Amino acid sequence: MTDLYYQLRQRFCDSLQKNLTHELLVNEVTPSLTVIKCEQLPFIIQLYGRNIPQRVPFEGQKTIHIDEDILYSKYDIIVKRILAIALHQKKAYARQTVVARVDKKTTIDFLAENHLQGAMPGKYRYGLFLDGELISLAVFSGGRKMPELNIEHYRSFELIRFCNKLGYNVVGGISKLIKAFIGDFHPSDIMTYTDKDWSQDSALEKIGFTKKSEIAPLKFWVHDDFRTLIRDENQYLELEKEFPQGYLKENLGSLKMILTIK
């Protein structure tokens, strides 16, 4: 176990325990793998050090997989996101909000502060506002024709980013945002990807999305607090040579989800 891993793990557990009333159970499976459980958490958390490149499956229970480098770089977002899921902090209802288009700068700032994968402005941006405060945001791509379907005027859009303001649980938020987008652009379908490191099934199924396919796990070379996506074996060998102090990581991949508009 590295000093950074130990310090991060201790800080992480302290941050969670401070906000939970039930005891946090911390099991050091190996020096580089810690399993964290609590009755108030609807999932277990597996925290990985740098010496474990691949995910370790935990059958029978929803699991969140977090790597040391991601926890280090996105610490506040991860802690607040977990607590929002567990405790439903600042619950808001979509019916209490106003939906409106959002400008690019506001979108980038909001995503940088609240989304684990960072900011992408996309082409169309819709937000939910509660008493003038932006609490939920959806970012969509432009339309894409699908000639392979041989359907005239068929257009597919991608939901590129969606998140709530950290600490908020916005009930019905994603449905209201998608409904507003559909009303303006009349898409034939909307597709998106969900990160399997955080959810092995998708809550989007509750609002009509279906699973189209599973995307294979991605590999990364982690070095100097950066992650570089490994696209092929040659690149991997080059990264290993250029950054010999780095290490390999692999996520669980993602689910491709699609909402077909009637």
Image (tube, grey):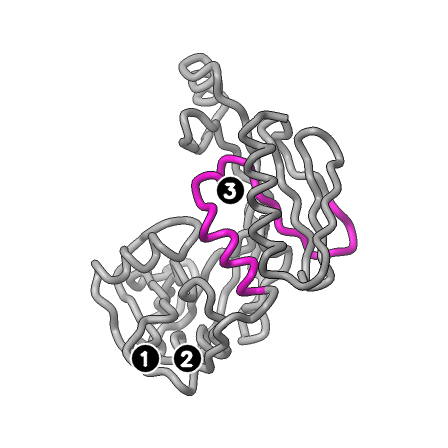
User: Does residue 106 appear to the left or right of 91 in the view shown?
Assistant: left
- Tell me what residue is drawn at x 37 percent, y 60 percent: 147
Q: Residue at x 27, y 66 (%)?
A: 124
Helix or strand or loop: what does disc 1 sit on?
strand
> Marks 1 and 2, Cα distance to the nearest angstrom?
8 Å
Viewer-nearest of discs 3 and 2: 3
- Main SS, magenta region, reads helix
Query: What amino acid does circle 2 point to?
Result: Lys
The residue that disc 1 covers is 99
Instruction: Return the residue at label 3.
Output: 71
Q: Is residue 189 above or below residue 60?
A: below
Marks 1 and 2 close (CB-CB < 8 Å): yes
Vertical placement of residue 261 versus 149, above or below: below
Q: Residues within 10 Å of mark 2 (few under 14, many from 20)?
A: some
Query: Which-is-in-front pick, marks 1 and 3?
Result: 3
| Type of the residue with mark 1 | Val
Q: Which residues are magenta?
A: 58-85
Residue 128's quadrant in the figure? bottom left
User: Which x, y percent locates residue 108?
Assistant: 27, 56
Asked whether residue 251 is drawn in magenta, I would say no
What kind of element bears circle 2? helix
* Residue 41 left/right relative to 116: right
Choose the circle earlier in sequence order: 1 or 3.
Answer: 3
Residue at image coords 43%, 62%: 166
Which kind of residue does numbered mark 3 sit on?
A: Leu
Query: Compared with residue 178, is residue 166 higher up or lower down, i.e. above or below?
Result: above
Q: Which mark is residue 176?
A: 2
